[in-house]
Image (cartoon, helix red, strand yellow):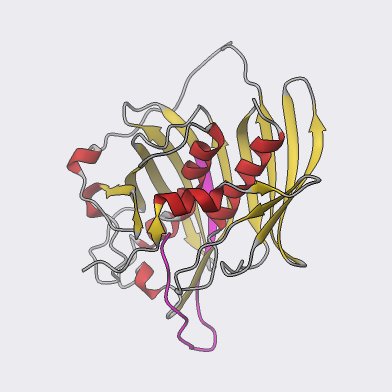
Amino acid sequence: MSRAPWGDAADLLRVLDVQPDGGGRFVGATHHDGGRAVVEGSQLLAQALVAGGRLAPGRRCVSGHLVLARPADPAVPLAFEVEELAHGRTKTNLLVDVRQEARRCATALLLLDVTAPDVLRHAAPAPPCPGPADSPPFDMRVTGRDVRIVDAAYTGDPAAPIGPPVIDAWVRYRDVPDDPYLHAALLAQFTGHLSIAAAMRPHAGIGERDAHHTLSTGVNAIALSLHADVRADRWMRYHHHSTFAGDGMTHSECRVYDEPGALLASFSVDAMVRRFADGRVGDKRVDL
């Protein structure tokens, strides 16, 4: 039996659609269902992308780098303070400071560009993979978001069979407004969800159900490059590949493709996986 939902895709869009508050400052809504009181870093990156797009309309965010300083509480409003570092004929550079009251939670650097006609073009091809129709659904507690996990590779169960450090997931959303920054934000918001699980997959007896119980886990940094306009209401394939785990850290190098196989985005995730030093049991994880 699935757990009660976190909320609907409409709730997620409301959270991501940050609102201007004057002077390059934006305010982000929060949503909390009473579970674990932590905002995922990928949500903060997604909200920063929307703030940047609102300040530089007509330019696509082509690069976004977020580093987490401390956990953000979903019960406290978020402020996104945007500083324009440079604005030229084709490019805009922005620094986004993510705060809750006087506390800095994260910092993002964004590069936006008007783009230009091709001088050359190539892209890494999509590895062979079953399509969404051939992949079982997985409930991540957001109604209106369809998630399919290829080969049922993600369960979170420490007793699950081991496999390569790779997880492919198909994702699409219902009823997304015709706003390119919200479509890009939805792509970004999912980047923090499965990279740690991909790192755990080759290791017997370890799974994401241990997170916040016997293991302290969390995303530390995300680097996202957007290669094309995004349609989040169409299938997007997230190809997660963990290339390193050790020293209490994991690193994943990932790509996002559309259903025909065109490369939409590339991203990397640096995260931590560590045992609680004092042997305590943490609170429950909440997947968004």
Query: Residue at image x 75%, y 35%?
Result: 93
Residue 113 in view in this figure: yes
Query: Residue at image x 59%, y 48%?
Result: 47
Location of residue 95 by image quarter = top right
x, y (%) of residue 216?
Answer: 50, 74
Up-down: is 283 above or below 241?
Answer: below
Q: Is residue 166 left or right of residue 74?
A: left
Location of residue 49 by image quarter = top right
Please tell me whether residue 271 belongs to the stretch shown in magenta: yes
x, y (%) of residue 181?
Answer: 56, 36
Query: Residue at image x 38%, y 56%?
Result: 198
Query: Residue at image x 41%, y 55%?
Result: 194
x, y (%) of residue 159?
Answer: 25, 71
Q: Quadrant of the N terminus?
A: bottom left
Up-down: is 140 above or below 231?
Answer: below
x, y (%) of residue 222?
Answer: 57, 50
Residue 269 in view in this figure: no
Q: Residue furthest left?
A: 134
Q: Is residue 259 left or right of residue 119?
A: left
Location of residue 126 by image quarter = top left
- From which residue to which does the magenta span run? 266-288
